[in-house]
Amino acid sequence: MDFQQVIMRLNEFWAEHGCLLWQPYNVQVGAGTMNPATALRVLGPEPWNVAYVEPCVRPDDGRYGDNPNRWQQFYQYQVILKPDPGNPQELFLDSLRALGIDTSAHDVRFVEDNWESPALGDWGLGWEVWLDGQEITQFTYFQQAGGLELDPVSVEITYGLERIAMVLQGVDGFPDIRWDGDVTYGDVHLRGEIEHCTYNFEVADVDNLRGMYDLCEAEARHALDRGLVLPAHDYVLKCSHIFNVLDARGAVGVTERARYFGRMRKLAREVAELYVKQREELGFPLRNKFSVPMPRVEPLPSPIQREGRDTFDLLLEIGSEELPVGDVDRGLEQLHQRMSEGLAEARLNYEDLRVVGTPRRLVAYVRGLTAHQRELERVIKGPPSRVAYDEAGNPTRAAVGFARSRGVGLSQLSTRSIDGKDYVVAVSKDEGRDASVVLAEMLPRVLRGLYFPLSMRWNASGVSYSRPLRWLVALLDDVVLPLEYAGVRSGRRSRGIRTLNAPELPIGQASDYFRIMEGANIMLDTADREASILRQAQALAAEVKGEVPEDPELLRELANLVEYPLAIRGSFEEQYLRLPEKVLLAVMRKHQRYLPVVRAGKLLPHFVAVGNGQTLDVDAVRRGNEEVLRARYADAAYFYREDTQKPLEAYTPRLATLTFQEQLGSVLDKVKRLEGLVPGLCQMLDVSSDQRVVASRSASLCKSDLVTKLVVELTSLQGEMGGHYAELAGESAEVAQAIAEHYLPRFVSDRLPQGMAGVVVGLADRIDTLVGLFAVGIRPSGGADPWGLRRAALGLIQLLVGKDVSLDVPRVLSLAGRGLPVEAGEELLGEVFDYIKRRYRGWLLDSGLRYDMVDAVLAERAHDPALANRTLQAFAPWTQLDDWDELLDSYARCVRITRDLHTVYPVDETRFVEPITHDLYETYRLVAARVRAHPTIDTLLRGIVELKPFVTEFFDRVLVMSEDVDLRQNRLGLLQAIGALPRGIVDLTVMEGF
Amino acid sequence: MDFQQVIMRLNEFWAEHGCLLWQPYNVQVGAGTMNPATALRVLGPEPWNVAYVEPCVRPDDGRYGDNPNRWQQFYQYQVILKPDPGNPQELFLDSLRALGIDTSAHDVRFVEDNWESPALGDWGLGWEVWLDGQEITQFTYFQQAGGLELDPVSVEITYGLERIAMVLQGVDGFPDIRWDGDVTYGDVHLRGEIEHCTYNFEVADVDNLRGMYDLCEAEARHALDRGLVLPAHDYVLKCSHIFNVLDARGAVGVTERARYFGRMRKLAREVAELYVKQREELGFPLRNKFSVPMPRVEPLPSPIQREGRDTFDLLLEIGSEELPVGDVDRGLEQLHQRMSEGLAEARLNYEDLRVVGTPRRLVAYVRGLTAHQRELERVIKGPPSRVAYDEAGNPTRAAVGFARSRGVGLSQLSTRSIDGKDYVVAVSKDEGRDASVVLAEMLPRVLRGLYFPLSMRWNASGVSYSRPLRWLVALLDDVVLPLEYAGVRSGRRSRGIRTLNAPELPIGQASDYFRIMEGANIMLDTADREASILRQAQALAAEVKGEVPEDPELLRELANLVEYPLAIRGSFEEQYLRLPEKVLLAVMRKHQRYLPVVRAGKLLPHFVAVGNGQTLDVDAVRRGNEEVLRARYADAAYFYREDTQKPLEAYTPRLATLTFQEQLGSVLDKVKRLEGLVPGLCQMLDVSSDQRVVASRSASLCKSDLVTKLVVELTSLQGEMGGHYAELAGESAEVAQAIAEHYLPRFVSDRLPQGMAGVVVGLADRIDTLVGLFAVGIRPSGGADPWGLRRAALGLIQLLVGKDVSLDVPRVLSLAGRGLPVEAGEELLGEVFDYIKRRYRGWLLDSGLRYDMVDAVLAERAHDPALANRTLQAFAPWTQLDDWDELLDSYARCVRITRDLHTVYPVDETRFVEPITHDLYETYRLVAARVRAHPTIDTLLRGIVELKPFVTEFFDRVLVMSEDVDLRQNRLGLLQAIGALPRGIVDLTVMEGF
């Protein structure tokens, strides 16, 4: 099918399905979404079904036509269904079939992909649709546009026309797509692609474009001021395109980007608001112009259940559009919990609750559920018996009153002994209701109780769920349990796997369910799917004498992407093995979720992809996936080639174009600060002079990879690529390593740098970030950490503790403060230190340490986290001793009596009276000397143990608070001295039991 | 059929016919032509067939949605066929049928419309296609694009989608077009239309847009410098759109417009040249990607003719696509001439030659053509007989050599007497060839001899003709005469009228032709068609008690627009009669070529349109035409309403925005100059003081209508509308008349102003134009008259002569020169006067006057054209006198003898010797006194008549050149005095025969 026929076929299909056919916009846009037929029409209450082609321009994606399927211009086919017709995925799959794609042979997948346009203030949830691993469509439920909440929600389907044509024609890249007859896509577009890339990357005049941006913005403003929606929108689009060219040209720093986005968003919001207002003034004229699904009106039937059975099996299947992988797990966990809680509260006994699921269904199966609730006796305490009955045993007015107030007859009162006294009580018995009735009330609560971090609305019910909920099976044995949730009514029809075109699967009775699902090629249990994937993958790897390395996280993800895993081995060209392995792996894992195949730890030119369903055409799916990987690797190879044209240090000057923070300057400025900070830090850390040289060089180069193309594309490779490029450029192995490692640890469980230089640069980087950002007034707030302050503080701690490196944190903060372009005074530095301390405390508590120990140690040693950590490690066993409390108490006695004194009294041993005082003092002196020499917690606590018998005897024999002032003060002075022993090590006074 | 279905149907149609389906461009364009799929692809040798929708933006056409079918945005459907497939009109008509349009019931017409895009340097010839009077399509053969000659020529078909949808749906305006289902065009576009109009006309910030223009131009330049075609093209398009908005905003004066056009054209040319170069470097890769018609290869058969017949009838029918009305007449005239000349040269006798034709065919019919050429004897002169033969009568070597050199035998030599001498001659007899053979050679020459002022190429033959020549019928009785011209071979198949879908009409023998044509509903003779139209139109007018005023020019045009006229009366709403009649008539005549219907000189709300063919659905055609006129009148009414919001003088200040010429300032500046010039001019012309007031006021207002909307739209109404608006604004009738008339005469045969004020303002206007433009260095060049200098000079002459107003032109030029903002010195003023004089001379010669008379009078009286004219009128009869030559000679004798003298000798009558000298002198004195008193040519020539006998006698008796110096000089002085008599009246020395 020729490219133009694909468009004609889609036009026919969507026109038949009630869509208005629209035209591409006559302003350059990055996506069909920006066409007012989407951007504006999705706003407000009016229905709107539309379909159109959109040539999209994304300057940054240009590769001079070198990459077979990554071009700066390409064609989208955009469909908007507003409101959700209830079956948009099925319509979409029908459209693929209308194009001749056999959806049972090809691996069509809905992979979570949430969408956000920072420029326009839009977002939505949905998927990218994969066809044999190739992303062919974006499918989104719009939640917000132009900064406005959408009601109704629009379904947006965005086909990548080239990708689809490539699949249909079996060609390998854009240029070979047949457009019509002999004319190819390359014939009509390749030259222009190269030219536009040249213009965008090399020619566009930055000042001119900035000028155009400003003028377009000004005109948008004029139009808005006159209430003109479309002229304003046009100019916003022009701003957006100009920005994109500037960006591709490399002319936009981070802060500047944020500012541009802010400017565009502001305009876009005003446009959106103005549009809605205008439509309202016009009386929403499109309201009755499209047919929209009508809500159900018949009432829900009453629940019934088979009579004469003691127990039932309950099946609840929540069918939905594909859940994101994380939400499958989340949903299952919550469903299990809500069901058990619900059944317990509902007083329904059962033998067994099983919760399993796939991306398309969450299933709770309750075996042996009692037909009826457990009986419940409720006892209400009344007046004491002696008050309620007279001596003749007749009820008094009190009893009568109580019975009346509780609505029971006098005969229903009885007497119970409560807390050793007799009371009149009213006992009511709740005999319970049929399970069906109870469940009909309970299950909607269970459904409502399922919560997802990112959830969405899609229809008039206003219900939120991870993705649209499309069917509910609720069976009590063979009887449907009537439920309604999110506009969906329960029934007995489940749906099959997509690969078999999701046939309806009627469930005769609950107990048939698992058999039917198995027969329908659906593997319900995630663990089964994981095991199956692993087994298949290893077998496929073994065929090429390789193996698949363990990767439980990816395995889980893969298992939750399918209902029935089919592993397929593919290959890629050996030439790509010349790329760094980390690049190959990052691409495989991040973009495609392929399992790599290795032999003796080295990557082989193979991979294992996991498809959905048994009926797939393995060759077709393999070919598709190989094609995708090939294109991705071609892209990576292109970047790599470009990047390695110059040595790493040649990139450093361009860091000036990346803004770190407006007041703190560019990333290059930051690098300069690191270069200044590193020598001082090395000195504090007593780093060897060899390592100092390494650290300084690493500091100069550590950020340079941020402007290399590969890192711009795959940010996760930052540092690693820097190290690699450093090595290629002839830097020493140690420098390369330090560059690669200085971002470590990136998260709590991450590994740490191996070399000291990496540690030093990593510390310097984080310290500069913390002090700098605090100094310009940025503070962490709530859960968000947009500036990475939390991450920086934690990383700092992890480095110091993990590498057991002592560092006086306040001192280094002060040193860093002096290098900043802004003022960082004492108070501010104190604030930063405090923040680090709090993070450290949180981290320690998370690790399971007792809070009192943590507080006790941090009170004295927070300035040196490594030392604090060592202290805590040594401290822990002490607190587990049987006589810890006594030991602590012994010390506490010394402190308690002196705590409120405002004076420290000198000790004059010549004036001691009692021998025990002498002994105590002598012991104290020995202990104090040892602690001074070795200020460890062990020395300290051993000393306290030593002192303990003397302390006991001292307090037994000596009245500290003598009336003789001198005597008293001398004794108090001794106790003060003992109390001061832990100073600098630990503050025992905050320990529990003190 | 819904709007979107129209597009789908056209897509299907053109895809089936080998067109690549393309998409609208993502830059705002004014026409689908600007999409690179046309603008660039038509360049160079590669074939290209493409079809696409294009939303077009023409800010100036916006009417805030008030006009039902004139919007600033609308949709074109654009088709490019490159090269010409040979039947593009038929394909186009098929496409209309594919849309369900019955082309035999509807009046589909191809009306000359040549196309030019000054912005891009493109032009082409073609038609607008009318459907029942409504323009639905532009059909153009591109001759040039981006300033480059096109080879091959592309056929461009540009459908107006809204117009077609309106016809198909039977709705009255854009807003009511059904787009899809219940959704109308108005639903999706009306609001945006209003907004864009508001932005373009009221909001757009002129400085910002100028800034954008400059930036886009700069970027186009950058792109061009790097050889980037498409990025440059995009920016050119952006420039063009920005310019259009500026223009709609009223911010572009005339000169500025020219400058903007120049800038855009320069860029567009560079883009075009770069594109062609690039394609060449790529090796023209599309060359084999489209199927193109292959040239015929079989050789042309030899001509034959029936044997045994003495005479034949010859039919030559030249079938073509619709010729412009003027070219029908031109073609017929030339065909007649070339045929008669050709047949005469070819020595073919015939009884009768008839040449007739329609827009689709030019026909020459020769009755009684001899079957054979007339015999021709050719005689070649050899040596004299006496040299060729010896005395014995035997041929000498000379004879032998002559015979050999001429390739004849000695026996074929004979002797002829030539100029009284005998020579040997070789006589060859050309007995003539068969008519068929001769015609086969001659007729292509006849075809090549047809010339049209605007002619075009369309196919590989490279032949130029008015429009593509598509068939040739050439019959000699019943035998086809083989011809090939412009890639077409002759045959016997003619084609019928379009209204009957142009069936093939086989012509059995030549003599059947006229009968067949009549039967096929084709009226071959223009005069017949004219008569028929007039008869029908008057009958239709009579039905509403009206009549159709005489308008031979329009009648001729109408007759040449059809092959069979069908007059149809339509009506328009009476409300429009409130508009000025001149507006109603201008619209009817200019745009629609309708005949107005009047009663007692007043317009009725009816019109007569003329359709093509008998089979039309009269009601449908009427409705269509009425609809068109309604829309046009709505537009005119809109303008008129807008214009009459303010009095005419309120428009005057806006003339400052219309640049007259850069150095000469705005039109307002010109008006100020006219105000300055008029009083002086009045004085010179001795105008009454009443008229002076009128003239001054008229001068102030004469240009103000140029910025009214109606005149901007219908330029032909300039002046007339000004007068009308002046009257509405309460100006005096005389002022209004002067404003209305000051442009008169607009062409050679045009009428002159009635009032003196109109004459004065008209003179002032033209004088200012001439002196001003010359002063800034503008000169007329070649045939072009872009600044209207020729028109101004001729108008000036026509006014002075026509109104017989004496004016000292050099003096008034000098007065005008003093008012200019630039220097206008003596030399320059002389140059201007000289130019006017040359124009006057040309005009006089054109009027049939003898050049010597003209030169003689102009030599003395050019400064006052009216005087010169009177002189010429009086002079003419003299030159026709039998004894004119003698009279002239008598005067000439006096001049000839004194001509070379460098001194003028005084005459001393006391020293005269001979009586005749005395007599001559006395007569001279009397004559000279009369001439001085009445310096007319009559007085002068009567004087010369009187002098003649004395002059004769004087020369008979007196030897002028006496040896006595004093005597001689005295005689010469007398003759000099006589010679000087004509001075200031005429220079008789330049007369023929002098």
Image (cartoon, coloured by chain):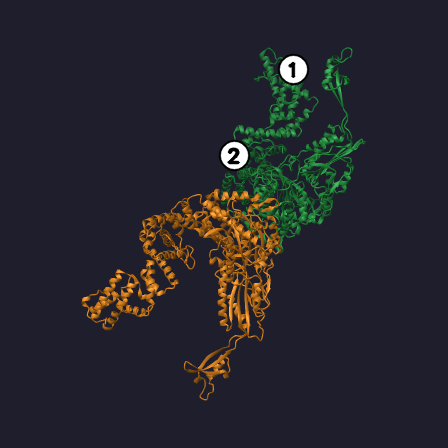
Chain colours: A green, B orange
Q: Position of residue A210 (x, y in %)?
A: 50, 43
> What subunit carries mark 2?
A
Q: Which mark is residue A954?
A: 1
On screen, B854 above or below A772? Answer: below
Quarter of the picture holding the C terminus of chain B: bottom left
Label 1 CA crowd tier, 10 Å (few <14, some 14–19, many 20+): many
On screen, B584 above or below B438? Answer: above
Please, what is the three-letter code of the amino acid marked with disc 1? Answer: Phe
Which residue is at a point 21% across and 71% down the rendered structure image? B963
Q: Are marks 2 and 1 on the same chain?
A: yes
Question: In the rendered structure, which disc, 2 or 1, sits on the residue that comes first in sequence?
Answer: 2
User: Which one is nearer the viewer's eye here, A776 or A488?
Assistant: A488
User: Which one is nearer the viewer's eye here, A429 or A157?
Assistant: A429
Q: Position of residue A632 (x, y in %)?
A: 63, 47
User: Which one is nearer the viewer's eye here, B923 or A493?
Assistant: B923
Asked if disc 2 and disc 1 are in contact, CB closer than 8 Å, the reply is no
On screen, B720 above or below B971? Answer: above
Residue furthest toward the bottom?
B392
> What subunit carries mark 1?
A
Label 2, on which residue?
A: A820
Q: Is residue A260 visible?
A: yes
On screen, A552 above or below B822? Answer: above
Q: Is residue B140 visible?
A: no
Q: Position of residue B631 (x, y in %)?
A: 52, 49
Label 2 CA crowd tier, 10 Å (few <14, some 14–19, many 20+): some
**Circle 1 — which element?**
helix
User: Which one is nearer the viewer's eye here, B426 or A826?
Assistant: B426
